[in-house]
Image: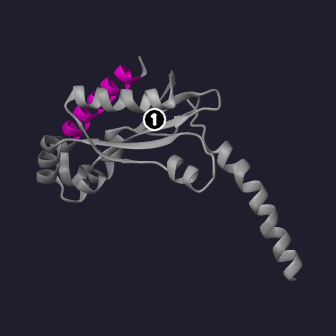
Amino acid sequence: MRKLAASILLGGMLIAPLHIAMAQDIPTVSPREGWAVHDSDKSYQALVEAVKTAAKDSGLGVVTEAGPTQAAADRGIEIPGNRVIGLFNNEYAVRILRLSTAAMIEAPIRMYVTEAPDGTATLSYKLPSHVYEPYMEEGGEKLAQAAEELEQDFASIADAAID
């Protein structure tokens, strides 16, 4: 029984790196519902920097930033570039908080930069209207308006970043 368990564990460990490599692609052909996905010709690092610059130029700030790539490298594991960048500003925070305390758990809204095997990068994000959908009954039309404005901001940031 121990040998069988060890074999299953070893097999899973051998397959796991393949699963990690395959999980990096976010398809633009049939994207996830409620997501915007943009391919780019930029490198991973160039796209990360372009998102930060475009966000600043649009009046949104980088509130959070996280990714496993460097931490994995520090452990001797190489994975494609992977960075989540949370964007928001105090104007939206105050507006949304007045409409729905619960909705603020969604702030900041994140953009996601992933590195493709060919060295280019993809920019993805959940549409703010999709993110705030569960709170619309509470926040009403004013929350829908704020979400639409955020959606326009995110689209502008994406356009500027991938150009």
- Residue 157: horizontal and vertical position, in percent? 32, 27
Q: Main secondary structure of the magenta part?
A: helix
Q: Is residue 158 above or below residue 75?
A: above
Q: Which residues, given as a range, are shown in magenta? A: 144-161
Please identify the residue farthest to the top as the structure is shown.
163
Check disc 1: other Cα within 10 Å, few if <14, some if 14-19, many if 20+: many
Is residue 40 in sight in this rendering? no
Placement of 129 over or under 43, stated as above or below? below
Pick the front one: 79 or 7: 79
Closer to us: 70 or 29:
70
Indicate the amino acid at tag 1. Answer: Ser
Task: Find residue 128 and report its image quarter.
Answer: top left
Q: Does residue 25 appear left or right of residue 70 in this picture?
A: right
Q: Circle 1 — which element?
A: strand
Residue wearing tag 1: 124
Residue 148, magenta (yes or no): yes
Residue 124 is situated, as x and y percent measured from the top left of the image, at: 45, 35
* Picture quadrant where residue 53 is located: top left
42, 94: nearer the viewer: 42
